[in-house]
Image (tube, coloured by chain):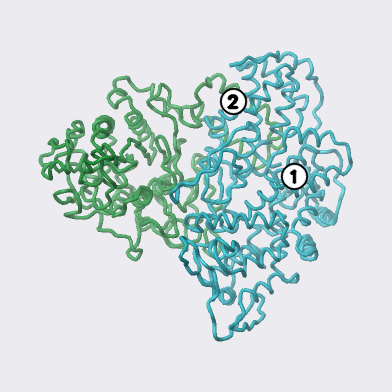
Chain colours: A cyan, B green
């Protein structure tokens, strides 16, 4: 065991008493930056709710990294951004993040939840098909495939589950009856729970999927998704009541898809705009985001209409929608409300706290400490093992997992409901973070953490700075420096152990464990 | 529950705290399709707790509780001198002399059967009562008991209601389609070590003093948490911290501190991982924990050199298990605690003497043995029988669902109660007749 060379006393000299200006927000009222803000702020004005201030650079940086890439900024990325004096640095960062491969990883993870990408029960895609499906989804997001095309492939492709990955849409459900397929389509692309519809509407929609067939081949676990031949035309009714007549040689799914992805369709763009908004702001304009129906009205109808138009009017460019939302002051508000109205967050008057996703949390811990994790799937034999440096946000198959991911509420991918992901904090999770050998070993012995402490052993001020930048993506406030100094003086843990205590405390803080 | 009767995940936000605060949580959210409330009104059963001794790997029935010396050495190998127990007519393996003195306290089922020969699927079938391969993953017995006897049903302990000592079995013993809070809490660590380092509860190398300092530090360093002290999420976050430290620094976690037991007690159980796990299990039962699995990883999968393993392992099992049963009985706990012993299957009765097996036994799902004691199960009985070579059921087949149903009945769990299913499927604790699961009825002989 090496000894820390520095004296923590040096730190005391640099930590001066000062008032603590909030590290989380910028002073003054937030100015509207685009039409989103005009719609949100005028709505707030009507409600008599004062919006929070604009977030500080540090808060914005961390938030936008986590929300788009599911990844923490490194200490270097954080200090560089904080030092940047250019006026448009937030917009520049947004553009850069949307091009990062981790953006595709993270959004593909969310979509894989909704589309139930999972090799084993109860979905039973089988590993090869799950992998093929996942890589197709990730690639579509990486290439920014227009959303209407994305949906069309998933709804209408035919062929082998191994060679034509989008056909797995029709396989990734617990029940393959036409009605169940229609329900899955409604949930994924109309944001609607069709079991709440009038029975006739669902039965009518199921007609479009009544000819889907599954056929085994000579190859182990290969399955062809195809259309049963027909001799008579199909009379069917679309969910908006329009009648359709489909010739026997035509694919009824294509008729449905053509109707669905029409820019004027009242469900399609709306559901996606609402979903992206919910992913970024923590709450849908219609909440829950996958429960759109007449008796569950949007919180701000004009806002939802505007976002839908922006999506459908720009050739369904989803990344453009992200850019629009991310650049708004509304998205960039501080997490500290300025209004005591308990519904302030529900009206988007501040950014809500949200516990990190299981995958994001373990990736962040591994990044900070330079450690890895074992992910495996115990069935089918032979077991699937992933390399140590596998990132959890990029796991290709819901069956490949770890006890940490299970403990922190990774969705089982059984139903495709957003609510399957469980980000509620629990006692077991706290125990694990505070005191498990799994986490304590990472913090106390992880190579990256050891290197950070060793590299700054002679300069305690820089050590504290680097720990803050690495873990919280910001510099410590003078008040925090004083607390650190005090702890280093009085606590049992001295030298390097005091640095480990600090890292441990920061990792177990609200600020680390919650998006904010 | 949403208005259409579909199961809504977020309708089950029950935390331990809700239970602690005495807010009995019998929510309509647990009622499915307006039918039976899954968790309401915990019925009074004789049994309050289950200790499942899980013989992962599948030990040979012929070398434990169903000896067949008359079948000849190709079947019984060198273990050909079974011993009489304290119940006349019941013989068990010669390597289990301590358990032989207690046969009046337990009953043997010698006609367990499911016909499954692979570890995972057999484990699943034995612990869920269901056939594997369907589209739904059913919860294991531990999760079912956790659902009906845990926080939603009056259990108020700080220790989670479903504990596994020490390593988790993995998904075949888990919550299946039930919410993740019904999963087991696996302790990790090793109770045979000087300090039983229960994952999250005991951190080796961190002194109590440092734990206290760290906790104070944590509060001081939580700048955002202080600013947002009124926020709902922050309140929940702070509550979980309180609970976590009750286990880390408070009395609740002391249940795992075996230094509180006398040396001769610890010696009696055997200073092995299994022996000390039995002791921890007894301590957990004393605190009302409803379900404890001892995941006994004792190399029971004896494809090779079966008899060497038996000579090495059975004395350890004999010591731990007999001390557990005796101790429960002495403390008046046996009448309310079910002890359930079996593996996922038995082993092939005919010994493979040839290389590379050198006296090995393969998987055997046609017939195998189980032991049950306490909680209302009568002692001193044998249920069913295998044939003269232990190859097939001769008499009175007992399927996994039969054993589970008997156990649930003793626990006061309605076997026809619905399990909350994520898509609202009508699923019951024990399969209904139409589900294609083989059953031959409850163990009436010993109830």
The answer for which chain carries disc 1 is A
Identify the image quadrant of residue B229. Answer: top right
Residue A239 vs A174, above or below: the answer is below
Q: Are marks 2 and 1 on the same chain?
A: yes
Q: Which type of secondary structure does the marked residue at label 1 adopt?
A: helix
Outermost front residue: B355
Q: Tell me where residue B110 appears, x and y as whole percent.
A: 20, 48
Q: Residues within 10 Å of mark 1 (few under 14, many from 20)?
A: many
Q: Considering depth in this image, is B164 or A171 the residue closer to the camera? A: A171
Residue A249 vs A258, above or below: the answer is below
Q: Considering depth in this image, is A113 or A277 the residue closer to the camera? A: A113
Q: Residue A64, which numbered label?
A: 1
Q: Tell me where residue A331 appears, x and y as whole percent.
A: 77, 49
Identify the image quadrant of residue A19. Answer: top right
Whether residue A117 is visible, yes or no, is: yes
Q: Which residue is mark 2?
A: A444
- Judge left or right: residue B358 versus residue A325: left
- Judge left or right: residue A492 versus residue B104: right
Quadrant of the image containing the N terminus of chain A: top right
């Amino acid at each position: 065991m090496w000894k820390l060379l520095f004296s923590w006393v040096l730190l005391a000299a640099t930590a001066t008493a000062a008032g603590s200006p909030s590290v989380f927000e910028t002073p003054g009222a937030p100015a509207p930056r685009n039409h989103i803000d005009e719609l949100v702020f005028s709505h707030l004005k009507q409600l008599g709710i004062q919006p929070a201030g604009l977030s500080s650079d540090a808060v914005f940086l961390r938030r936008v990294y986590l929300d788009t890439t599911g990844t923490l900024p490194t200490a270097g990325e954080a200090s560089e951004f904080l030092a940047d004096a250019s006026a448009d640095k937030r917009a520049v960062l947004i553009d850069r993040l949307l091009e990062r491969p981790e953006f595709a990883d993270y959004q593909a993870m969310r979509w894989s939840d909704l589309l139930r990408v999972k090799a084993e029960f109860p979905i039973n895609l089988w590993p090869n098909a799950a992998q093929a499906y996942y890589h197709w989804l990730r690639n579509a997001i990486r290439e920014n495939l227009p959303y209407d095309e994305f949906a069309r492939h998933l709804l209408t492709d035919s062929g082998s589950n191994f060679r034509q990955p989008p056909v797995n849409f029709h396989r990734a459900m617990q029940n393959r009856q036409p009605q169940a397929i229609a329900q899955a389509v409604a949930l994924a692309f109309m944001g609607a729970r069709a079991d709440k519809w009038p029975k006739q509407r669902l039965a009518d929609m199921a007609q479009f999927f009544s000819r889907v067939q599954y056929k085994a081949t000579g190859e182990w676990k290969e399955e062809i998704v195809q259309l049963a031949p027909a001799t008579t035309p199909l009379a069917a009714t679309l969910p908006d009541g329009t009648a359709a007549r489909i010739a026997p040689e035509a694919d009824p799914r294509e008729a449905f898809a053509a109707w669905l992805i029409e820019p004027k369709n009242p469900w399609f763009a709306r559901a996606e705009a609402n979903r992206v908004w919910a992913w970024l702001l923590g709450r849908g304009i219609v909440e829950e985001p996958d429960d759109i129906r007449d008796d569950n009205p949007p919180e701000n109808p004009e806002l939802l209409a505007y976002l839908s138009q922006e999506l459908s009017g720009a050739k369904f460019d989803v990344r453009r929608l992200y850019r629009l939302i991310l650049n708004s002051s509304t998205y960039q508000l501080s997490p500290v409300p300025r209004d005591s109205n308990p519904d302030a967050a529900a009206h988007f008057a501040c950014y809500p706290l949200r516990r990190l996703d299981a995958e994001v949390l373990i990736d962040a811990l591994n990044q900070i400490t330079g450690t890895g994790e074992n992910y495996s799937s115990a069935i089918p034999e032979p077991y699937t093992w992933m390399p140590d440096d596998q990132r959890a946000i990029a796991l290709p198959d819901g069956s490949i997992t770890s006890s940490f991911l299970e403990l922190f509420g990774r969705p089982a991918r059984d139903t495709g409901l957003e609510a399957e992901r469980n980000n509620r904090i629990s006692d077991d999770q706290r125990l694990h973070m505070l005191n498990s050998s799994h986490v304590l070993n990472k913090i106390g012995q992880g190579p990256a953490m050891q290197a950070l402490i060793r590299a700054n052993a002679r300069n305690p001020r820089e050590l504290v700075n680097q720990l803050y930048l690495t873990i919280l993506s910001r510099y410590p406030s003078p008040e925090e420096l004083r607390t650190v100094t005090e702890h280093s003086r009085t606590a049992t843990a001295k030298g390097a152990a005091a640095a480990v205590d600090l890292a441990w405390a920061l990792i177990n803080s609200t600020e680390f464990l919650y998006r904010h | 529950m949403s208005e259409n009767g579909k199961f809504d995940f977020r309708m089950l936000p029950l935390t331990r705290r809700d239970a602690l605060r005495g807010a009995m949580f019998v929510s309509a959210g647990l009622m499915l399709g307006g039918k039976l409330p899954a968790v309401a009104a915990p019925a009074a059963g004789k049994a309050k707790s289950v200790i499942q001794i899980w013989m992962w790997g599948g030990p040979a029935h012929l070398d434990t509780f169903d000896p067949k010396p008359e079948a000849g050495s190709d079947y019984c190998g060198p273990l050909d001198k079974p011993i009489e127990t304290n119940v006349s007519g019941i013989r068990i393996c010669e390597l289990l002399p301590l358990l032989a003195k207690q046969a009046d306290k337990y009953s043997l089922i010698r006609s367990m059967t499911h016909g499954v020969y692979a570890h995972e699927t057999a484990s699943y079938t034995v612990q869920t009562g269901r056939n594997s391969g369907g589209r739904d993953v059913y919860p294991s017995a531990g999760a079912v008991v956790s659902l009906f006897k845990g926080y939603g049903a009056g259990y108020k302990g700080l220790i989670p209601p479903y504990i596994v000592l020490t390593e988790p079995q993995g998904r075949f013993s888990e919550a299946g389609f039930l919410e993740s809070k019904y999963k087991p809490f696996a302790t990790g660590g090793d109770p045979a070590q000087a300090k039983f380092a229960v994952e999250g509860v005991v951190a080796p190398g961190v002194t109590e003093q440092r734990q206290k300092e760290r906790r104070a530090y944590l509060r001081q360093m939580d700048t955002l948490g202080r600013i947002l002290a009124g926020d709902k999420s922050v309140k929940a976050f702070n509550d979980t911290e309180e609970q976590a430290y009750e286990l880390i620094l408070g009395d609740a976690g002391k249940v795992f501190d075996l230094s509180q037991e006398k040396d001769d007690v610890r010696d009696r159980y055997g200073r092995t991982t299994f022996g000390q796990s039995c002791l921890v299990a007894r301590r957990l039962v004393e605190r009302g924990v409803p379900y404890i699995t001892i995941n006994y990883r004792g190399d029971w999968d004896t494809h090779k050199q079966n008899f060497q393993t038996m000579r090495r392992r059975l004395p350890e099992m004999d010591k731990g298990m007999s001390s557990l049963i005796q101790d429960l009985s002495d403390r008046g706990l046996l009448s309310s605690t079910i002890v359930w012993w079996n593996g996922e299957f038995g082993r092939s009765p005919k010994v493979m003497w040839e290389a590379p097996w050198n006296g090995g036994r393969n998987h055997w799902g046609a017939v195998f043995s189980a032991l049950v004691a306490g909680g209302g199960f009568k002692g001193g009985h044998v249920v069913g029988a295998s044939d003269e070579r232990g190859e097939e059921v001769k008499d009175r087949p007992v399927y996994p669902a039969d054993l589970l149903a008997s156990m649930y009945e003793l626990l006061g769990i309605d076997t026809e109660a619905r399990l909350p299913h994520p898509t609202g499927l009508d699923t019951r604790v024990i399969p209904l007749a139409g589900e294609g699961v083989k059953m031959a009825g409850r163990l009436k002989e010993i109830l």
